[in-house]
Structure formats: structure tokens, C-alpha cells
Image: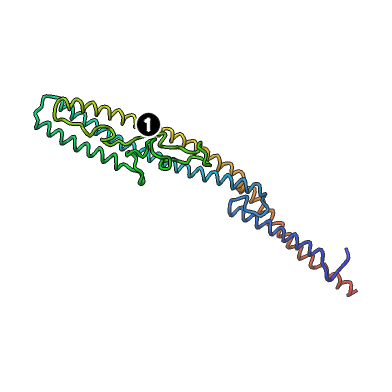
Amino acid sequence: MPLRIFNNLSSTVAQNRLSINNDNLGLVIGRIASGNRLSGKDVNSAERSVSELLRSDARTLRQATKNLNDGISLINVAEGGLNEQTSILTRLREVLSVAGGAIDQNTRGTLQLEINTLKDEFNRIATGTDFIGLKLLDGTLGRSVTTSKQITISTGLNSDEESQLNLNKLVDIESTDTSSLGLDGISTSSFEKSVDSLAQVEAAQETILGYRASIGATQNRLVRALATLNVSVENLYAANSVISDADIAEEVANLTKQQLLVQSSAAMVGQANLIPEGVLLLLQQ
């Protein structure tokens, strides 16, 4: 190899390798520090794109699980209201059964007072049962509600119909106030009216029990959908982990390798810088 003063090619080559090894060392340190294999600039863009898509899908489905949990909570609130109305109807039947016996008018008047109070509470539950501002027993959950006002839960990755659960179609609870159930006219004023009123209360109770059965079926469906989503989210995170998570054992071994390369490259730069001194030796002879 010829000796040169102005251009030390060996030093240039050694400096090049030192720069490359320094960059590689920085990438390895970044991967270990972040735990992310895709944090480096040398990563395949296709892998990064797939990883981002998996993360996006997982986060979308995670939000869908929150939507389902909200839906389950809503259904539970509606069930609580219907349960109390069922209890009131049971008490109304008891009172009307008493009114169907041999009692005087004063007693009938007293029984009517209790019936009126129970009806008021029944209507209060019908209009006051709500979930974050959504009325649940005033007909809002009925099929007859206009499409724009229906309650729909997003449970998937897109806006397809398969990714939506319409609670109005699943539950279909019409208004449960006394007017809608035909209970406004129940009375204990006479034996005949008491008997007729008892039949009306029994019919209303059948309607409420039907709504509760629909609530129960919807609860089961939402719980199953939630379990399915949780499994999907878990699998998406696992798939993304395979692509993006750094293998720390491998990266630590690579760290040692890169540190040795940097040290040896730095040493070789020093050695290469001594080569031009050979010119002085020639001149001294």
C-alpha cells in the first residue's frame, strides 16, 4: 500500500466503520430501552404498517368492549326498574284481592288510597328510570322509536350492520306507565270493579314479565359478545407482540457485540492515523 500524507484511506475506512457501528449500537440501546423492536430506522416498513394496523384494531375492539359494558349496565338499570314495577303489581294484586272480599266502603276507600299511591310510584319509576340521561321505561327502548333516536352499540371494527347491536330491536320495551298498561282505571269502589281491576293488573304483570324475559335474553347476548371481543383483543395484542416486541435476550447479546465492534473500530482509527508517520521514518533515513 503506498504511503500518502493528504489522504489516509485506511483511517477513512476505519472511521466509516466506527460511524456505522456507533449507529448500530444506538439502535440496539433504543430497542432495549423501549422494548420495541420496530423503534429503529432500519425496520421494514411493511412490518411497521402491519403492527400499527394490529394496534389500531385492538384499540378499536377495546373501545367496543367498553361500549358493551355500558350496554350491559343500561340493561341492568332497566331490569332494576322493571323488577320494582313487578313488586308494585304484586302488591296491587294483593290489595285488589282484599277488595274482592266482604268489606265495607270505608275499607274500600282506604285500599283505594294505597292503590293510588302505588300507581304514582309505578309511574315515577316508568318516567324516572334512566341511564346517563337516557330514559329506559318510557318507550325509548321500543321498536316504534324513530331510527335516529334508537340506541345502538358499536361492537366491531367498522360500521357494518353486523358490527352493531340495536337495543330497541333486541329489547323492545314500550312505555310501562299505568296509562300504557291500562291501569289508570283500577278501582276498589265495588266488588265488580275490584274483580275487573284484578284482571287488568294480571295482564299488566304478564306484559312486564315479557319485557323482563327480553331483558334477560339481551343480557346473555351482550355478555357472550363481550367475551368474544375480549378474546379477539387478546389475540390481536399477541399478534402485534410477535411483530413489535424486542427479544431482550437477543438484543443484550447484540449490545455486547456492537460495543466490541465500536471499541475495535475506535482502536483501528487510532492505528490508521499512525500510518502517515511512516513518511517521517523514510525521510529520516
Residue 145 percent location from the top left of the image: 38, 38
Q: Nearer the viewer, residue 107 or 61?
A: 107
Point out the residue furthest to the bottom here: 284
Residue 101's quadrant in the figure? top left
In which quarter of the view is residue 54 placed? top right
Measured from the top left, where is residue 158 in percent x and y? Answer: 53, 42
Give the total of numbered labels.
Answer: 1
Badge 1 crowding class, 10 Å Cα cut-off, few under 14, some 14 to 19, many 20 or more, is: some
In the displayed structure image, the side of residue 279 where residue 95 appears, left or right: left
Q: Nearer the viewer, residue 213 or 11?
A: 213
Q: Residue at x 62, y 48 (%)?
A: 49
Read off the residue under disc 1. Answer: 214
Picture layout, residue 255 above or below residue 87: below
Residue plotted at (8% across, 28% down): 104
Question: Residue 60 at x, y = what percent?
Answer: 51, 45
Closer to us: 59 or 127: 127
Q: Quick check: can you spot residue 104?
A: yes
Amino acid type at image mark 1: Ser
In percent of the image, x 24 and y 34: which residue is there?
88
- Residue at the image point whose x is 31% and y is 29% from the top: 207
Q: Is residue 53 left or right of residue 65?
A: right
